[in-house]
Image (spheres, helix red, strand yellow):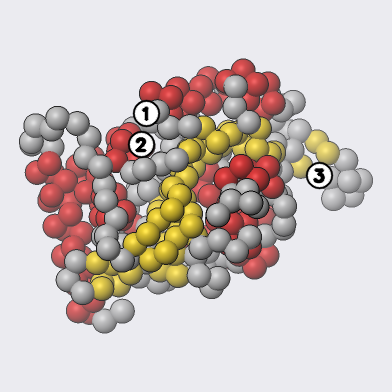
Amino acid sequence: MTPEEEEAIRREFEASRQAGHEQTQQQHQGPEMFQVNALSNVKHVIGVVSGKGGVGKSLVTGILATELMRAGKSVGILDADITGPSIPKMFGIGNERLTAMGEHLILPANTVTGIKVVSTNLILEHESDPVLWRGPMLMGVLKQFYEDVAWGELDYLLVDMPPGTGDVALTVFQSIPVEGVVIVSSPQDLVQMVVGKAVNMAAMMDVPVVGLVENMSYYVCPNCGERHEPFGPSRAEETAKHFGIDMLGRLPIDPAIAALCDQGTIERDLPEHLLDEALDIIAPVDAE
């Protein structure tokens, strides 16, 4: 990226952050609905959420994006975990930077298979730089990621949400046309309460829940092949039944999957059929 393009991106984001700050000083009758630009046609928006951090939400986003791509769908990822983005590294594009298109639009980064990605790590000088922005600035950047990116034709836009139920999650639910959310949990005693927070927020925002994915559910002994549950027996089925939502799958603790995410080769090396149940609901074969 040329110095001129980099400066254009920085100017755009500075203006967006300022707009977000000014927006909080105004009285609104209701939440603002974000609109894509004329160069974008996004057919479906799916959010990936969790009631708390550290459960592998970004991993599930990466798996869903990869499996949708393998199913022949055009896919984009909006990395809304603005202060803790990990999607670019997972897809091996951590060293790339977003570029400007004209005066007002942004081109997303493209992975090796054509998945389109926007993330704050793609505008920072160094990927390890902290994002020290207050709420209004975060909201301005989120709006720009949705409205000002030239997404092109997308079958699915996956929104990798920050953990919890804070400002960014609220803005995504209120301002982006999310069709459904996938909830990610881990097998711990507090899982029902944590999942409940995500389910109840989705209900309050009138957003359907696609279902529940349990990550770090078990591991398979490499010597004997026996399955073990280091965090105790899974409560995923019980939790899904309690809230009346679908169970979409249980992901293992697998050092190989962690390694390919660190190496940025998830698209090439991810094992197949990890979340078939989720894919059957999100992108049924007979869907147009």
x then y, percent, for residue 183: 53, 35
Q: Residues within 10 Å of mark 1 (few under 14, many from 20)?
A: few
Image mark for residue 173: 2
Q: Nearer the viewer, residue 19 or 225?
A: 19
Q: Nearer the viewer, residue 256 or 282?
A: 282
Q: Nearer the viewer, residue 24 or 265?
A: 24
Mark sitting earlier along the chain (3/2): 2
What secondary structure is marked by label 1?
A: loop
Q: CA distance from mark 3 to mark 2?
A: 37 Å
Q: Which residue is mark 1?
A: 205
- Identify the amino acid type marked 3: Val
> Residue at (89%, 46%) from the top-left corner?
225
x then y, percent, for residue 190: 57, 21
Image mark for residue 21: none
x then y, percent, for residue 188: 63, 26
Q: Are marks 3 and 2 in contact (CB under 8 Å)?
A: no
> Residue at (31%, 66%) from the top-left corner?
39
Q: Nearer the viewer, residue 213 or 277?
A: 277
- Identify the amino acid type marked 1: Met
What secondary structure is marked by label 3?
A: strand
Q: Which residue is mark 3?
A: 220
